[in-house]
């Protein structure tokens, strides 16, 4: 198909080539299917549909109502959930909507420290979550790189937060949502599990189910879940819980209605129905047996990769991984995260620099890199290729810089013949 705006469409083609030729190791990225891509790029982008199915503020919503209801039903099946909101434009918007629904400005939230692996929206002072709400943080232990739940309980008892966030952007271990719920119940807080990263693994029963334990879960739809960029709110058994009553100045509404209004009109206008359609397509894919095999392979690939790094003397935070990612402290390799990201970029391996717990470098430099296997597993790569990739990374970071073009050729040999998109 010919387009009129060559400037932009030529750049999109450049990006298609970049995504196809390179090895994509950013833990929050993935490659969507052609069906997801087609739905996301469909004429549904033309439609305004403020409100919810059956209760819109615009006419002509009969088709998008059906689409949104299908997306909700599929997500309910996928997560064994009682309540789903598919409208958040992103993971951050989902978190914003939950805080909006559950908290008043000035209330306290307890989240995973950003510099230990948490997310900006978990109370960071540079984010609305740290500006509008009082914040308190828990982090990982220096010796183990893991969460210590007794310490989290101590912090919760001391800080008395109204909402606790369980979840992270760079934590490679299982999160004990049951223990988090016990802590939340003890201090009378709401537990929100942010499962943006492990959502696909949780949906397929490979990691601990957050939906049965947390009052509310939020997620992105584009990481391990392999859908379009977007967010979602999920609730299990607590969906009718009227705890809004004690949290929102005598508001007696049940939680599901508070959350719906937290998204719209609280925090967003018209939902992106093209993206909601793409979410529905992705949820159908995620319900399949194939997706279970995919998720099992993602985890296996991450395990093999982490073990190979450890065997080569790399310091993996916590010593390994239970999910799709790992965080590598590069200090013993005499290179910082910024340099490593740039060097690997030269051979077309894409990673992101990342703070490691107790980092001595700034967030713009960092001492580490974060690596994930969701995208490369979508391309069909298995355990053997993980060892090859670690070998390429190791030679790139610790070898002779003159050999970079040879390494780049080896990257292309690995990705050749692994087409991603229809020609
Ligand atoms: N929550 C966690 C744990 C994340 O890792 C991310 C994104 O990286 C988000 C929320 C926010 O998602 P988005 O970038 O879609 O706003």
Image (spheres, rainbow, N blue to C red):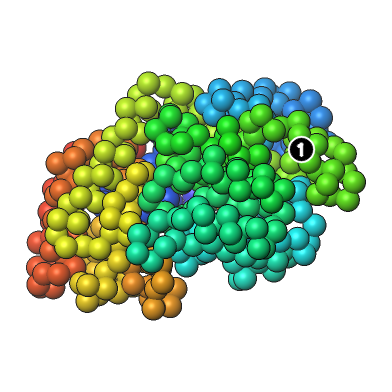
Using the rendered image of the protein, determine whether residue 264 is visible from the camera's viewpoint. no
Q: Decide: is 128 above or below 222.
A: below
Q: Decide: is 298 above or below 106.
A: above
**Residue 89's spot in the image, x, y percent?**
62, 46
Residue assigned mark 1: 255
* Residue farthest along the right direction in this orientation: 250
- From the viewer's perspective, is 353 left or right of 193? left
Q: Residue at x 22, y 76 (%)?
A: 334
Count neighbours of disc 1 (C-alpha within 10 A) and say few if under 14, some if 14 to 19, many if 20 or more: many
**Residue 90's spot in the image, x, y percent?**
59, 48
Residue 358, by quadrant, is bottom left
| Residue closer to the observer: 2 or 39 | 39
Q: Residue at x 90, y 46 (%)?
A: 250
Q: Residue at x 58, y 55 (%)?
A: 153
| Residue closer to the observer: 69 or 178 | 178
On-image quarter of the C terminus: top left
| Residue closer to the observer: 95 or 420 | 95
Q: Decide: is 336 above or below 40.
A: below
| Residue closer to the observer: 219 or 177 | 177
SS class, disc 1: helix
- From the viewer's perspective, is 66 left or right of 12? right
- From the viewer's perspective, is 213 left or right of 404? right
Instruction: State whether label 1 is within 8 Å of ligand 1.
Output: no
Q: Decide: is 376 above or below 399.
A: above
The number of callouts visible is 1
On-image quarter of the N terminus: top left
- From the viewer's perspective, is 8 left or right of 87? left
Using the rendered image of the protein, determine whether residue 417 is visible from the camera's viewpoint. yes
**Residue 102's spot in the image, x, y percent?**
75, 49
Q: Residue at x 63, y 31 (%)?
A: 236
């Amino acid at each position: 198909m010919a387009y009129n705006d060559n400037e932009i469409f030529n750049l999109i083609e450049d990006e298609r080539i970049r995504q196809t030729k390179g090895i994509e190791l950013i833990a929050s990225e993935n490659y969507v299917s052609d069906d997801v891509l087609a739905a996301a790029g469909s004429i549904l982008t033309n439609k305004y549909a403020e409100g919810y199915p059956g209760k819109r503020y615009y006419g002509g919503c009969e088709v998008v109502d059906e689409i949104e209801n299908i997306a909700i039903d599929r997500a309910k099946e996928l997560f064994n959930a009682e309540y789903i909101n598919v409208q958040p434009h992103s993971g951050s918007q989902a978190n914003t909507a939950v805080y909006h629904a559950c908290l008043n400005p000035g209330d306290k939230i307890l989240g995973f420290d950003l510099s230990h692996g948490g997310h900006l929206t978990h109370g960071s002072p540079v984010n609305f979550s740290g500006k509008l709400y009082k914040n308190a943080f828990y982090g990982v232990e220096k010796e183990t790189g893991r969460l210590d739940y007794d310490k989290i309980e101590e912090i919760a008892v001391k800080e008395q937060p109204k909402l606790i966030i369980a979840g992270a952007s760079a934590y490679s271990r299982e999160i004990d949502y049951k223990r988090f719920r016990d802590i939340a119940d003890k201090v009378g807080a709401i537990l929100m599990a942010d499962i943006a990263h492990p959502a696909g693994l949780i949906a397929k029963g490979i990691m601990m189910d957050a939906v049965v334990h947390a009052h509310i879960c939020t997620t992105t739809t584009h990481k391990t879940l392999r859908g379009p960029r977007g967010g979602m709110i999920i609730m299990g058994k607590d969906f009718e819980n009227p705890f809004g009553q004690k949290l929102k100045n005598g508001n007696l509404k049940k939680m599901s209605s508070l959350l719906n209004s937290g998204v719209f009109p609280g925090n967003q206008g018209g939902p992106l129905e093209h993206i909601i359609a793409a979410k529905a397509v992705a949820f159908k894919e995620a319900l399949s047996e194939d997706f279970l095999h995919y998720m099992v392979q993602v985890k296996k690939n991450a395990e093999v990769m982490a073990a190979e790094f450890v065997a080569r003397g790399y310091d993996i935070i916590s010593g390994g991984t239970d999910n799709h990612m790992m965080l590598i402290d590069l200090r013993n390799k005499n290179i910082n995260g910024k340099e490593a990201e740039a060097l690997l970029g030269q051979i077309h391996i894409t990673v992101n620099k990342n703070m490691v717990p107790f980092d001595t470098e700034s967030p713009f430099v960092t001492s580490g890199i974060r690596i994930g296997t969701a995208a490369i597993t979508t391309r069909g790569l298995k355990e053997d290729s993980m060892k090859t990739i670690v070998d390429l990374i190791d030679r790139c970071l610790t070898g002779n810089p003159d050999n970079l073009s040879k390494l780049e050729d080896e990257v292309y040999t690995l990705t050749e013949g692994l087409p991603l998109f229809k020609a």
